Image (cartoon, rainbow, N blue to C red):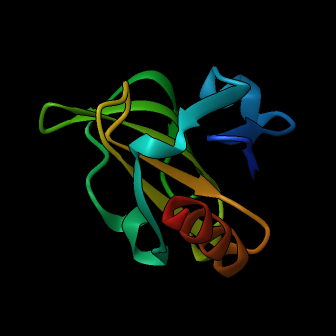
Amino acid sequence: MAEVSIDGRDLVVRIEGLDKLWALKSRLVIPLANVRGATVDPGITKDRKGIRAPGTYLPRVITAGTFHIDGERVFWDVRDSDKAVVVELADQHYARLVVQVDNPAEVVALIEKACAH
């Protein structure tokens, strides 16, 4: 699971617990200027993931780490698809982040509000 916060002009995503091990990351910091938006998308876990490198993928259990698909890098950290939030990025190492959070609607509102300023 991930904890998402805003720190000044940055979006900060902290990977929690054992997910750090599975995702091979503990923290991502993205300038808000490069965040295009966020949505709640429980259906995204059914989409193709692409090539895992590096990370962990056990169908219907966990998707975590970096996945390469259609020439883009996507960071995943999802166990429960009902809590999946997709963050679209521009001019970053990742094209999007797909992370599980405790309260998806609140996280999306937080990101959208921060991007509006």
Seen as rendered, the residue at the extreme right is 17
- Residue 72 visible in the shown view: yes
Seen as rendered, the residue at the extreme front is 117
The location of residue 47, given as percent across then percent down, is 29, 61
Identified at 76% across, 51% down, the residue is 5
Depicted 21 relative to depicted 48: above or below: above
Identified at 36% across, 33% down, the residue is 67
Depicted 5 relative to depicted 69: above or below: below
Seen as rendered, the residue at the extreme left is 70
Q: Quadrant of the C terminus?
A: bottom right
Identified at 63% across, 41% down, the residue is 9
**Along the viewing direction, whichever of 111 and 63 lies nearer the viewer:** 111
* 97 relative position to 73: left or right: right
* 87 relative position to 3: left or right: left
* 112 relative position to 37: left or right: right
The location of residue 98, given as percent across then percent down, is 49, 52
- Residue 1 visible in the shown view: no
Quadrant position of residue 30: top right
The location of residue 89, given as percent across then percent down, is 37, 45
